[in-house]
Image: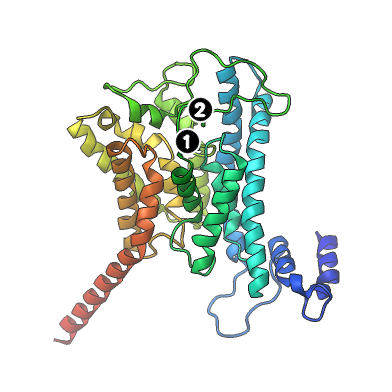
Amino acid sequence: MKALRNYIEKIKPNFEKGGKFEKFHSVFDGFETFLFVPSSTSRSGVHIHDCVDSKRVMITVVVALLPALLFGMYNVGYQHFLAIGQQAGFWTMFFYGFLAVLPKIIVSYAVGLGIEFIIAQIKGHEIQEGFLVSGILIPMIVPIDTPLWMIAVATAFAVIFAKEVFGGTGYNIFNVALITRAFLFFAYPAAMSGDKVFVRTTPVCSLGSGSVVDTFSGASPLGQVATATSSPVDIVNIVGQPLTQWDYFLGLIPGSIGETSKLAILIGAAILIATQVASWKTMLSVFVGGAFMASIFNLIGSTPAMTVSVLDQLLLGGFAFGAVFMATDPVTSARTEKGKYIYGFLVGFFAIAVRVLNPGYPEGMMLAILFMNAFAPLIDYFVVESNVKKRLARISKNNA
């Protein structure tokens, strides 16, 4: 690392003002601050001096996402070989999933970071690091068979119209990764839902050749709930075998790449809470709100979707992933402590409501979070106003 640090310092003058590559200062600065903590510090006008900058925070989130991503790669291979009726070892399944997922990650980062680099150069600003997280979230919340060109188009749309037009990192109103998924969902609905998009049956390189078994159905558990005609809803895997809550928890089910394993998501949640990067209050409130809404539907029970148990509702789909990694986004969620409880509760409440009441949107978590993103500032406003009124009343009482 010392040799790399010395090399960076050696070429740095070329990218500073007056250097022959000064036009690429933003790009160089982005790579330098990604590799090393900046050595410059403020001498006045600040209250805290800390080596933990936003890049380090973003990297912590990426680390927390890795368990879900790695399991997602394995599950892509597991579902593939199950669908084609072939036996395969752990590493064969993982390597198949790795080759299937990697191009999506590359496209997401190439398009998103490419746009941010260009905008930073045009403005003469530092490269913003918010896309470090968005770039890995986007491939994790889409079906495995989503075409790469669709991911590229949706990512470009989200970065430009949901982020940069608002001022860049820290100013966006809506979660960038979820805007990407929403764009895909409404612009290309056939690629985001149905029986085939969640399980890849085509070979990657020379792996996985074979024919699909006759009983194959790639519908995710939520898709099966949405189309069920009788209660209780019998949820099966892609070869017709019944699925259990343990399967939901481990994640060996069809679904978006990074959203299936609740165990992996739980590990990520522990990392975020231990490092104080994300709020446990928001996470907990999302689950409470979801459980509350699911309990109400269980009491009504007029449709098959309403009879799905509370625990199943919380384990299915992207509910847990959204609660841990999306609803806790510090930019687009509520920031007051009381507001986090309100915001999280309403996210969970509306996620289950949309999922059950509108079969056309079985994954209600996306719409619930985006909806509450718009109301997060209003929630904070009323919380602050309430606190101000209480303090003024207390002062008036003390002065009386």
In the image, which is nearer the foreground, mark 1 or mark 2?
1
The image shows residue 303, relative to residue 364, as above or below, that is above
Sequence order check, earlier mark of 1 and 2? 1
Q: Residues within 10 Å of mark 1 (few under 14, many from 20)?
A: some
Q: Which residue is mark 1?
A: 190
Which sits in the foreground, 109 or 183? 183
Residue 167 location, x and y as percent? Answer: 52, 70
Picture quadrant where residue 159 is located: bottom right
Task: Say if residue 322 shows up in the picture.
Answer: yes
The image shows residue 170, relative to residue 262, as above or below, that is below
Residue 124 location, x and y as percent? Answer: 66, 75
Q: Which residue is mark 2?
A: 196
Q: Residues within 10 Å of mark 2 (few under 14, many from 20)?
A: many
Residue 149 location, x and y as percent? Answer: 61, 44
Task: Say if residue 61 shows up in the picture.
Answer: no
Q: Residue furthest top?
A: 214
The image shows residue 116, relative to residue 307, as above or below, that is below
**What's the residue at 40%, 35% (across, down)?**
315
Specify the amino acid type for callout 2: Lys
Specify the amino acid type for callout 1: Ala
Question: Circle 1 sits in a helix, a strand or a loop, which is it?
Answer: helix
**What's the residue at 30%, 71% (across, down)?**
384
